[in-house]
Image (cartoon, grey):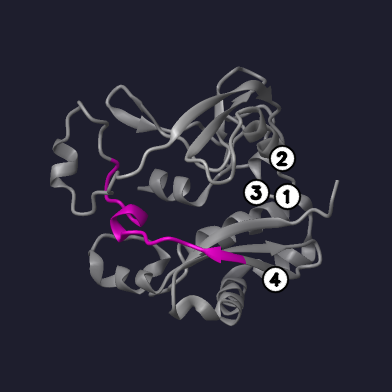
Amino acid sequence: MEKLELFTTIRCDLGLLEVAGHSSTDVGWNQKPSPFYMLDFHRDRMLKAAVHWGWDAAVKTLDGEAGLKSLETFLRDNVPELASAPCAAKVLIDQHGTLGIVKRPAGPAHLNNLFPSCLPAPSGHDAQQALKADRVPDRDFDYELLVDGQSTTQSEFTHFKTTHRTIYDRARHRAGINPADKKEVLLINQRDGSVMEGSIATPYFWRNGRWVTPPVAEEFDVARGSGGNRGTTRRWALER
């Protein structure tokens, strides 16, 4: 296996500075305000993984208010293009606590899509909830959804987000997905045949009049949950 690093990908967007005045509803850390989308949640996911692997130096880099401030400073120092256009910053950390970054452009995103006050029902279902909400996400995009023909073994590499991505790469290859395709493939848990998660996104399903998502254990356990990743937007949605 190549060198293992933990990572998370953060949207960097000056438009997020408008969040504080966008609504009185609690939308998270960005109310401070911050141009880094859900920065504390991204820090938390990397910190939890570092604790799991016993990477003491990485834990020291990320832990507490000092760790959060250090991560924010790292982003400000390494994303000079923030003023010109939004970008996605893939932040990596190794067992020695060294941070790295890989950037790519990010398209525009409406605040309603980043901080929705509800997830509207699918077409043909009761839409009253969405009519009453103040931050209804736009749904002007479609993805072709595929199901992986092979099952995936639940492991710490599916629970935590790491650079060991072979599991997801193989699922996308089996589904014939190219990088530019508007397609996603659902991974299936080998243990019980349930949906684990998507290869690059968190799936939600409409069940009995509400949205649900595959269960993910708070702490890593091969016998609990769907085996998927405890993603940042998934955590945000469940907490609200």
Q: Depth check: give the residue in front, 35 or 31.
A: 35
Q: Is 64 positioned to the left or the right of 213 in the image?
A: right
Residue type, mark 2 in image = Glu
Quick one: label 3 or label 4, which is nearer the N terminus? Answer: 4
Nearest-to-viewer mark from 1 and 2: 2
Quick one: label 2 or label 4, which is nearer the N terminus? Answer: 4
Q: Is mark 3 on a helix, strand or loop?
A: loop
According to the picture, the residue beneath numbered tag 4 turns out to be: 61
Look at the numbered discs 3 and 4 and tell me whether their residues touch, using CB distance below 8 Å: no
Q: Distance between the residues labelled 2 and 4?
A: 22 Å
According to the picture, the residue beneath numbered tag 1 turns out to be: 52
Q: Where is residue 70 in the image (x, y as percent from the top left)?
A: 61, 77
According to the picture, the residue beneath numbered tag 2 turns out to be: 156
Look at the numbered discs 1 and 2 and tell me whether their residues touch, using CB distance below 8 Å: yes
Is residue 85 on the magenta stretch? Answer: no
Q: Distance between the residues labelled 1 and 2?
A: 9 Å
Q: Position of residue 63 (x, y in %)?
A: 64, 67
* Residue 218 sits above or below residue 75 on the image: above
Q: Is mark 1 on a helix, strand or loop?
A: helix
Q: In the image, which residues are magenta?
A: 103-119
